[in-house]
Image (cartoon, helix red, strand yellow):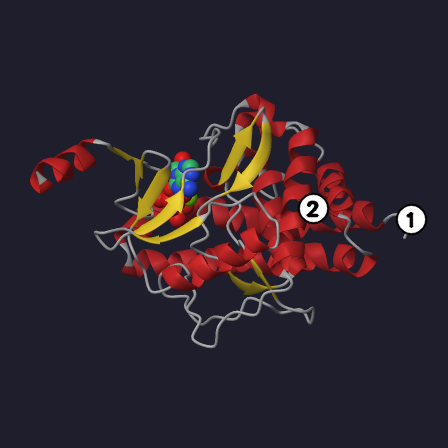
Amino acid sequence: MADLDRDVDRQDEVPLVGDGVTQGIVRVGDTVRRPVRPFTMTIQAYLAHLRAAGFEGAPIPLGLDDRGREMLSFVPGDVPREPLPPDTAGEEVLVELARLIRRLHDAAQGWTPPADATWGGIPGTQGASSTPDDEPLVVGHRDYCPGNVVFRDGLPAALIDFDLAKPTTRVYDIANAVYYWAPLMHPKDRSPAFADLDIPHRVAVFADAYGMNASRRHALIPLATTMIHRFHVNMRAAAEMDPVFKRFWDEGAKDRLPRAETWIHDEGPAITARLTAGL
Ligand SMILES: Nc1ncnc2c1ncn2[C@@H]1O[C@H](COP(=O)(O)OP(=O)(O)OP(=O)(O)O)[C@@H](O)[C@H]1O
Ligand SMILES: [Mg+2]
């Protein structure tokens, strides 16, 4: 009987494939199971805090299952894939994402990670500092790529995949979100629906919807420039030690990331000018 039950369980497991970094993610009914990593219990504690603080835009942590895997609630909705659907380039998407991240940050603000907290990172970058400004720390998501945003009724409704969450600053976390969603990339590296957008305007729309103060508006593009440089350096290092990252690198990151660095260097001043106009 027990064996029979296990077979039924196995049949009910539906593989979930995202950006391909994490193997073995499955859906079982209303839950998701993920392999346990060193940071898993820290993230479960963080997600529990977010819930307790009233933030509903993240999976509910459900501990470990009987096979020792992480268990989370399945978040209903649609996760966009490349090339991103044209609707995801609308301004209302940016507005809703900014509000979602503002609520996340406000909920996270009251949480002090446990003394033995362990955080994730891309291979080879553990321990690297990611907070070059002197704002207070807050645990942010730090990976707002389209594959980690769940849409409902055409708008961002929740965030998943907190594997890279760790203490950061609000403005640094915002830099990550606008990198993916303004986006802060060379036009030829964007999904077609994003190629011709007015990026300074879109960054300002995000900043308004988040409610960014003057000092964060001034800090955003310089920090984003540093962040993109780090993406480049870190991705190159990760490609040397991890086959998945080697594939990302070879399949285009090696060209996209230097292009993004050049692009932000050229376009950054106009974005900051728009962001800070009238301050
Ligand atoms: N809690 C969840 N609720 C709904 N869908 C989920 C959930 N967790 C994962 N998924 C789905 O599975 C996909 C892959 O999961 P996830 O983003 O966690 O891993 P990944 O993309 O391989 O990792 P990474 O983003 O680090 O590359 C997601 O894009 C999403 O479609
Ligand atoms: Mg993901």
Task: Indicate the amino acid at tag 1.
Answer: Gly
Q: For mark 1, what is the residue?
A: 278
Which residue is the extreme one toward the right?
A: 278
Q: Secondary structure at mark 2?
A: helix
Q: For the residue with label 2, is its CB less than 8 Å from the closest atom of ligand 1?
A: no
Q: How much space separates mark 1 and mark 2, taking CA atoms?
A: 20 Å
Task: Indicate the amino acid at tag 2.
Answer: Glu
**Residue 252 visible in the picture:** no
* Left or right: 279, with 193 as reference point: right
Nearer to us: label 1 or label 2: 1
The quadrant in which residue 49 appears is: bottom right
Residue at 58% from the left image edge and 36% from the top image edge: 157
Q: Which mark is residue 136?
A: none
Q: Position of residue 98 (x, y in %)?
A: 67, 43
Residue at 28% from the left image edge and 61% from the top image edge: 241
Q: Position of residue 225 (x, y in %)?
A: 62, 56
Q: Position of residue 276 (x, y in %)?
A: 83, 51
Q: Residues within 10 Å of mark 2 (few under 14, many from 20)?
A: some
Give the quarter the ligand 2 occupies. top left
Q: Position of residue 257 (x, y in %)?
A: 49, 49
Which residue is the extreme one toward the bottom?
A: 115
* Left or right: 102, with 69 as reference point: right
Q: For mark 2, what is the residue?
A: 267
The quadrant in which residue 190 appears is: top right
Q: Earlier in the sequence, mark 1 or mark 2?
A: 2
Q: Secondary structure at mark 1?
A: loop
